[in-house]
Image (cartoon, rainbow, N blue to C red):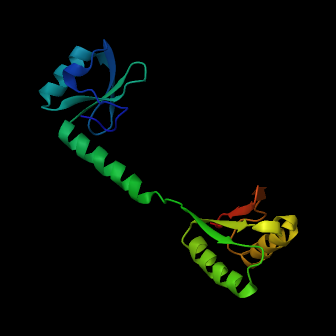
Amino acid sequence: MQTNNQNRIRVNFQIKVPQVRVIQSDGTSIGIMPTREALQLAQSQELDLIEINPKAVPPVCKIADYGKFKYDEKKRLSETRKKQKIQELKELVFRPTTDENDMLHKLAFAKQFLSDGNKVKFTVKFRGREITHPQIARDKLYWITQQLNEFINPNPEISSEGRIMWMIVSPTK
């Protein structure tokens, strides 16, 4: 009897409002009528009176088979879940002294992540006195954006906090 935890669908005698707007099972609108008459109409057709939109004034109710309605609702929800693309954040970590060959290897991973539709976070970790040369890390991050130019949205923001500098890039759609 629940579509999800917040919305509870009221059926037949659970509907306590004095008037409702009634819709037939084929989608045609009958109009506004007392709830008692709507219930009698639904019972005469051997169907249920299902409250579709309780927030409308008066609430909207549909005359339909409740079992079929629940099945269709569940099917519609599973279809919307299938269509949703979950975007993950993948992280690639390196240091300011990481060699170009290793960077190219990390770029190959980044291209794969971006082609799968995921965001990629490039993190530069400083050790010891490396923090005194943040421009080296900033140059590496700019180099990465140049290499991934066709795969990412333009101008990602470079941020830093303490001994870490990072940049998050998102794929172009």
Compared to residue 1, the image places residue 40 above or below, namely above
- The location of residue 153, given as percent across then percent down, is 71, 65
Residue drawn at 20 percent across, 36 percent down: 66
- The residue depicted at 28 percent of the width and 40 percent of the height is 26
- Which image quarter: residue 69? top left
Above or below residue 54? Residue 119 is below
Q: Which of 33 and 168 is in front in this view?
A: 168
Q: Where is residue 82 in the image (x, y as percent from the top left)?
A: 39, 59
Res 144 → quadrant: bottom right
* Count of numbered marks: 0
Q: Which of 58 and 116 is in front in this view?
A: 116
Q: For the point 33% across and 19% down, which residue is it?
A: 20
> With respect to residue 22, does 86 lie above or below?
below
The C terminus lies in which quarter of the figure?
bottom right
77 on left or right of 117: left
Residue 65 appears in view: no
**111 left or right of 167?**
left
Q: Which picture quadrant has residue 156?
A: bottom right
Looking at the image, the residue that sits furthest to the bottom is 101
- 165 sits left or right of 34 in the view: right
Q: Residue 137 placed where, x, y %?
A: 80, 70
Give the quadrant of the N terminus.
top left
**Residue 93 appears at what percent x and percent y?**
65, 70
Whether residue 103 appears in this view of the structure is yes
Q: Nearer the viewer, residue 130 or 70?
A: 130
Please, is residue 171 above or below residue 50 in the view?
A: below
The residue at the far front in this view is 128
Q: At 68% across and 84% down in the image, what residue appears? A: 102
